[in-house]
Amino acid sequence: MSRIQLYFSVLPWWMWLIALFACLAFLICFFALTPRNARISVALAVMIVWIELGRWISLGLVQAFAKTTYILPVIFVGCLALISNSPKRRTSPLVLMIPIAGIIALIWIIPRSTQIDLILHLMQIVTCFSAIFVAKLCWSEEQTRRILMGLIIGYTITLLIPFSQLLINPGSAFAIGLNRFAPFKSNPNQIGPIFIISCVFGVYLFLASEKPKMRFWGIGLLAASVSMGLLTGSRTVVYIQAMILIPAAFKIIKRPVLAVTGVFLIVVLVVVLIIQSAQSVQQTRLTNLQTARFELQYNYLKNIMKNPLIGFGTMTAGEASDEWVYGSHAHNSYLQSATFAGIPYTLILMTPSAIALFAGLRLWQIRRIYPDLSNRYFFASVLLLGLLLVGLTTSLLYYPTFSASFMHTWLVAWLISSWQSNRRNEPIELSNHTY
């Protein structure tokens, strides 16, 4: 039984009805009281925090409430983007492959899926459309900055939740027996993408901002995300963060004052945090590449080939084979989606992601034409690559209750649409005086 099923079965229906009305009242008040220019930024920040509150199990009813109602702020953000008066970029048909594939898959898995699986898949389609609507707004420079700032604020607030337990009560922030950073009884692998995304945003703020306070914000975000990423003991998180920091280092080297200041502060913060808590972490995990996931994923692949075109719906590979002994999910987003709805469905999902990486490369190649945008699209491409690599070791990339799913679709839509605008000889971004 999934955790969402558990919450719906334990709590009475009238509590969920009260929670629903409370959410709707909050969103209506938010719309009425927030200045129009700040709505999309604040809404995105609230959405990120709301979704990620579902990670922290020890928060009790707060976590259960966030986990089961996360779709409401996602819909709200999509509606705000849809009714916005700002210029909207034309959406490439390549981007629409993602939700269209989801709709087709939803039809053919209906006879073979449980009610909760169908609801989650429908929510994933809604999340995709919401992310695409937000990406359409990333045409004007002003709206793009607002969207980025909303996401950065959201992940900063989210990062403060595990950071608070690490500072206040570091002993309880580690999973007993695993000796890995698991604040509020969270899963270290599931909170890893929060640290990866925050790491990218921290580097972006540090390099792209001219204001000192924004650079210090970036340094703090980077130091906190890297240090907590190390403490999770997750090889995926640590290796991907290293991959992100390597290209960033080449950019920092070109700016010596930033390099010296930033590196010194980052080293001090990281060392202090690690010394405080490193004795509790299995650091040997980071250098030991032995894992049972390869055999696990091989078993998944064998079972997928028994029904490669339409998958198994709700059925896991374990239900399709007596050889299954490891668990109920593949620790791989692509194998998980192929098990769920077949290899063609998975290839359709992966194609826009590959095209988006190519689009990011093309946008980087014309950076001399748009020097002010080079950092933005460079780090968008790096973040997308990081999320795709996360998909190789976790099943959350196409799972709607994680903010990484929204971020993935938004990045794909933004990069492809920007590249298509350049091919049509349209401006990649409209300056404030253009419209």
Image (cartoon, helix red, strand yellow):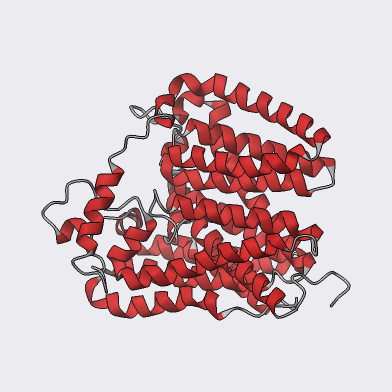
Q: Quadrant of the N terminus?
A: bottom left
Q: Answer with the quarter of the image where residue 115 lies.
A: bottom left
Point out residue 235 in the picture as x, y percentages from the top left corner.
Answer: 44, 37
Rendered view: 149 above or below 224: below
| Residue depicted at 56% across the width and 27% down the height | 168
How many numbered discs sit on the rendered protein? 0
Rendered view: 102 above or below 322: below
Point out residue 106 in the picture as x, y percentages from the top left corner.
Answer: 35, 76
| Residue depicted at 53% across the width and 32% down the height | 165
- The residue sitting at the left extreme is 322
Q: Is residue 41 visible?
A: no
Point out residue 5 in the picture as x, y percentages from the top left corner.
Answer: 31, 59
Rendered view: 6 above or below 416: above
| Residue depicted at 40% across the width and 78% down the height | 103
Q: Nearer the viewer, residue 74 or 152?
A: 152
Q: Is residue 179 visible?
A: yes
